[in-house]
Image (cartoon, rainbow, N blue to C red):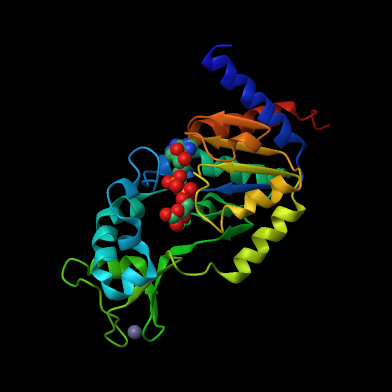
Amino acid sequence: MVGADREREALARAAALVAGARRGVAFTGAGVSAESGIQTFRGKDGLWRQHDPYRTSSIEAFLQDPSYYWRISAERWPAYAASRPNPGHLALAALEEEGHLAAVVTQNTDGLHRQAGTKRLVELHGNGRRVRCLDCGAAEPREEVQRRLERELPPRCRACGGRHLKPAVVFFGESLPAAAMSEAFQLARECDLMLVVGSSLQVYPAAHVPGTAVERGVPLVVVNDEPTPMDVAAEVVVRGRSGELLPELLRLVRSSRPERH
Ligand code: APR
Ligand code: ZN
């Protein structure tokens, strides 16, 4: 079977599994936002190929030198600020709306699933649109902090003058938000389908979420541009770009539904 036929066949099998799901969970990573113009971390042209992840976003390195993180944030901010949900985000919101997905559990901090209309969203790694001062707890919107980076590196807290303004995202070495974790694992324990989109599945404990569903024998569908460590456990692996594949998956799910009378 040549490549295109194989992908079409995989997509059809994935659509049949999604069409049959009533409590599916989509577990997403940076790959689902790649087509919104936000750079991924791993895989080809990933951020961690250009910058050391530890120096960039571990809490230990940040506390010693917050400028390192903010210098890279300044580089990435224009793409981040300009990003909008892509057809992949919108397709996942539609699959929730039409009763196949119970929720989206995401590692992404860009807020694009929420903007796309996903109602039940679990942000395991927080949300980068808000910034908090580690010294006094004051919070402010990200864009205001980004605006003063040119003349103020690291940015100083408006309330206490502190140097540790940090986006409300989970850095390496920090624990994940407990409420998000318990909701994500509860969803994984109750789901009837696990759909992984755009994640290299290399970061824990987040990757335990799809792992929990797989351990229960729930069908796993992987939509990803490159191989992942969980491909071997998947019922179906669809190789390619989520911004094209997810709308196609949605179309096949809709066409497989008996006509509503
Ligand atoms: N469509 C589908 N998959 C894609 C696309 C695309 N358009 N573009 C890239 N990918 C795939 C890549 O091949 C890669 O396997 O998405 C995956 C992205 O993997 P990562 O960059 O590692 O992102 P993620 O899995 O979300 O990383 C998890 O690591 O650095 C931390 O906190 C950060 O939340 C992040 C976590
Ligand atoms: Zn402060």
Dividing the picture into quadrants, the one containing residue 121 is: bottom right
Q: Is residue 237 visible?
A: yes
The foreground one among 90 and 238 is 238
User: Which quarter of the image is occupied by the N terminus?
Assistant: top right
* Residue at left offset 46%, top offset 65%: 170
Residue 237: image x %, image y %?
Answer: 60, 31
User: Which quarter of the image is occupied by the C terminus?
Assistant: top right
Ligand 2 rendered quadrant? bottom left
Residue 187: image x %, image y %?
Answer: 70, 56
Q: Is residue 30 visible?
A: no
- Asked if residue 175 is positioned above or below residue 235 in the image, the reply reads below
Residue 236: image x %, image y %?
Answer: 65, 31
Residue 249: image x %, image y %?
Answer: 62, 31
Which residue reaches farthest top? 1
* Residue at left offset 56%, top offset 69%: 177
* Residue at left offset 63%, top offset 29%: 251
* Residue at left offset 36%, top offset 63%: 57
The foreground one among 46 and 244 is 46
Dividing the picture into quadrants, the one containing residue 229 is: top right
The foreground one among 238 and 119 is 238
- Asked if residue 220 is positioned above or below residue 23 in the image, the reply reads above
Q: Is residue 113 left or right of residue 45?
A: right
